[in-house]
Amino acid sequence: MFLKELELENFRNYESEKIEFCRGLNIICGKNAQGKTNILEAVYLFSVGKSHRTYHDNELVKFGADKSKIKIVFDFSERECNAEIEIFKNKRKIISVNDILIKKNSLLIGKFNVVYFGPEYLSLVQGGPKLRRRNLDILISQLRPNYFSFVTDLKRIVESKNALLKGNNVNMTMLEILNERLSSVSAEIIKYRFEFISRIEKIANRIQSEISGGTENLKMNYISSVGGVESLSKEEIKEALKEKLKSNEKREIEQKECLVGPQREDVEFLINDLNAKLYASQGQQKTVALVHKISEVELIKEEIGEYPVLLLDDIMSELDKKRQKYILENIKNMQIILTCTDSQMFRKKEDKKIIRVENGKIKR
Ligand SMILES: Nc1ncnc2c1ncn2[C@@H]1O[C@H](COP(=O)(O)OP(=O)(O)OP(=O)(O)O)[C@@H](O)[C@H]1O
Ligand SMILES: [Mg+2]
């Protein structure tokens, strides 16, 4: 995957800009609040059709304008492709890929792959489970388009079930129907999450060992509400969930909330068999986040045969010299677009492009 060009029109604080990228390292440099993250956000939009920092598309339109247009030109499998997103203040956005209109967000996913690593992901280990689930969901969705539909279905079912449980007299037939649907879609999601965590773990363990000079071993476990799902089929997971939902029925009605399902599940990291959330140092936890992200990159390469575009937002200054070096030296043959306030640390690296940003304009 090689992003050649990005065009922005009334996007965030950009009025009209065209940015060209090189194949290697692209460094977006500028002071705070100039529009560095906005560029990564625009690129990210083409991967899952949503911003990484807001659910509200209208925030993306430049103040005072009523629509925004962003466009990319990229190479995928040695073929030149293009994609365009038009975002409006008060109607749904319009997406096209290679000049063909795309009706649903889900049909965009997988056409242009990125891995995004920003400061919010540094708390991947010690933060709440929501971030870990979301991260996994974004990765799997890019590689398995039907997974994205399962996640959307799950969200709808959980919303309906919560609304039902909030009522005074819970309709038990309705609850049973929703639990049946919840179990089916959850089994699909759990199976995928389990498969992908095992695959990430294999890659991550190798990288963790390299970064730690062979002293640390990293394990990842998917923690499901139905216990170990390793040897279970989809049908068996579904049945186990149905039983779990049945045994929690009273509690769910009392607490007026859906308590069982993938929307409550988590991923656990173990360094040398110790739970990283509880025992790892801050530096070790950040390293696990970094290792996780690099593993995602490698996994996408394994799957689609080429590297995704790696977006690094303000991350280098958070890592020590050794880890910075690891990123710059070990992720070769791929395109990186990173933001920083000081481009000094990249002095030596050849094959790079520095893009200077000031107040929503590229300095030329
Ligand atoms: N819809 C919008 N219209 C106009 N300007 C906007 C819009 N949304 C955000 N901005 C402006 O964009 C700027 C922030 O851009 P961005 O987050 O890309 O900064 P940054 O260069 O990454 O800064 P930092 O180094 O602090 O992370 C802010 O000044 C904000 O006011
Ligand atoms: Mg920023």
Image: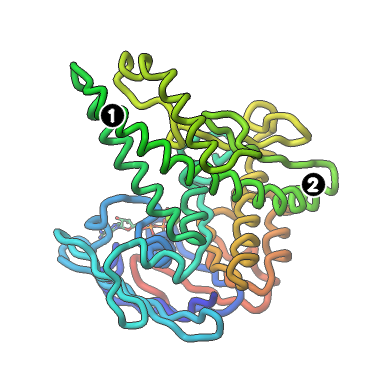
Q: What SS does tag 1 mark?
A: helix
Residue 364: tell me if it is visible. no
Image quarter for ligand 1: bottom left
Q: Is residue 176 above or below residue 154?
A: above
In the figure, is residue 235 to the left or right of 13? right
Q: What x and y, as percent, mark residue 33?
A: 38, 56
The residue that mark 1 highlights is 162
Residue depicted at 30% across the width and 71% down the height = 102
Q: Is residue 14 above or below residue 59?
A: below
Q: What SS does tag 2 mark?
A: loop
> How much space separates mark 1 and mark 2, taking CA atoms?
45 Å
Q: Is residue 276 above or below residue 187?
A: above
Q: Are marks 1 and 2 in contact (CB under 8 Å)?
A: no
Residue depicted at 42% across the width and 69% down the height = 357
In the figure, is residue 292 to the left or right of 66? right
Mark 1 residue crowding within 10 angstroms, few (<14) / some (14–19) / many (20+): some
User: Mark 1 or mark 2: which comes first in sequence?
Assistant: 1
Residue depicted at 26% across the width and 22% down the height = 172
Amino acid type, mark 1: Asn
The reply to whether the residue tagged 2 has its Cβ within 8 angstroms of ligand 2 is no
Amino acid type, mark 2: Ser
Applied colour scheme: rainbow
Which disc number belongs to residue 212? 2
Q: What x and y, as percent, mark residue 335?
A: 58, 72
Q: What x and y, as percent, mark residue 103?
A: 27, 68
